[in-house]
Image: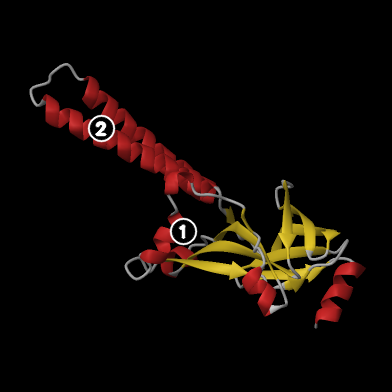
Amino acid sequence: MYSAIAALAALLGLLVAYSAAKLLWKDSWVLGWLRGMFGLALLALAVVFVFIAMDIFSYRQIQSEHNVATLSFDKKADQVFNVLVVDAQGVEHNYIIKGDQWQLDARIIKWTGALANVGIKPGYRLDRLSGRYYSLEKEREEERTVYSFNESPAGIDVWAWLREVKEQLPIVDAVYGSATYLPMADDAVFEISLSVAGLVARPLNEEARAAVGDWQ
């Protein structure tokens, strides 16, 4: 669904670009300056549509609760961990996280009303991975580690725009989903699942279960 929406936005961009090219290259320049300015404006609009398509294409449809990422922890030093993140497409990311706990965040686009009734599912995009310290003093003084998974192209952020206009556009809602902060431990492996209710983190091995048990 989100690939189709992105393709539609890209198609609109191409149509606008084609119209702009025809206008700019037309032989009759009676209103040349106005035509040229309008054509350039259409080209700029076409570029915006392309960036919108690229941003929407980074979202995945939520069918039901399913795994969106697996996190594996390798302790490098006291309160320093290498974190291997493998997303639902099998793409691997490595990050150095400092602190005692980790959290994964996602951006979620929810459709409401008639669009939800016809079966359009919410979409998600993994947003960022962060760490934090148990100690409030360290939380204030030590270096914080936060990593972004996806950057919107050229500042075109559809999710942020939807949050700003949610009062004027009640058919769609842009929300933030976060897994609860969980402890980091050497060799621990966690699975992150996502449903329409949000993110859920589960320990997958004994090291992860022991870390959660000690923390609780």
Disc 2 versus disc 1: distance between alpha carbons? 27 Å
Q: Give the residue type at disc 1.
A: Trp
Label 2, secondary structure: give it: helix
**Seen from this angle, which residue lies furthest right?**
206
Q: Position of residue 154 (x, y in %)?
A: 44, 44
The answer to whether residue 65 of the structure is visible from this angle is no
Which residue is drawn at the image coordinates 59% and 68% (left, top)? 177
Residue 212 higher or lower than 55, as above or below: below
Q: What's the residue at 64%, 70% (across, down)?
A: 141
Q: Badge 1: few (under 14), some or many (20 or more) residues near its Cα, within 10 Å?
A: many
- Tell me which numbered mark, 2 or 1, is placed earlier along the sequence: 2
Relative to the observer, which residue lies in front, 51 or 75?
75
Location of the C terminus by quadrant is bottom right
Question: Residue, x 27% and y 36% (percent of image)?
Answer: 42
Is residue 66 among the parts visible in the rendering?
yes
The one nearer the camera, 169 or 38, is 38
Q: Secondary structure at mark 1?
A: helix
**189 vs 12: above or below:** below
Report if the CB atoms under discs 2 and 1 are less than 8 Å apart. no
What residue is disc 2 on?
40
Side of 2 relative to 31 (left or right): right
Location of residue 96 with respect to 144 vertically, above or below: above
Checking the image for residue 68, the label placed there is: none
Point 12% across, 24% down: residue: 32
Q: Is residue 7 left or right of residue 100?
A: left
Identify the coloring. Answer: secondary structure
Label 2 Cα crowd, 10 Å radius (few <14 / some 14-19 / many 20+):
some
> What is the x, y in percent for residue 66?
71, 62
Percent across and percent down for residue 30 are: 7, 22
- Mark identifier at residue 159: 1
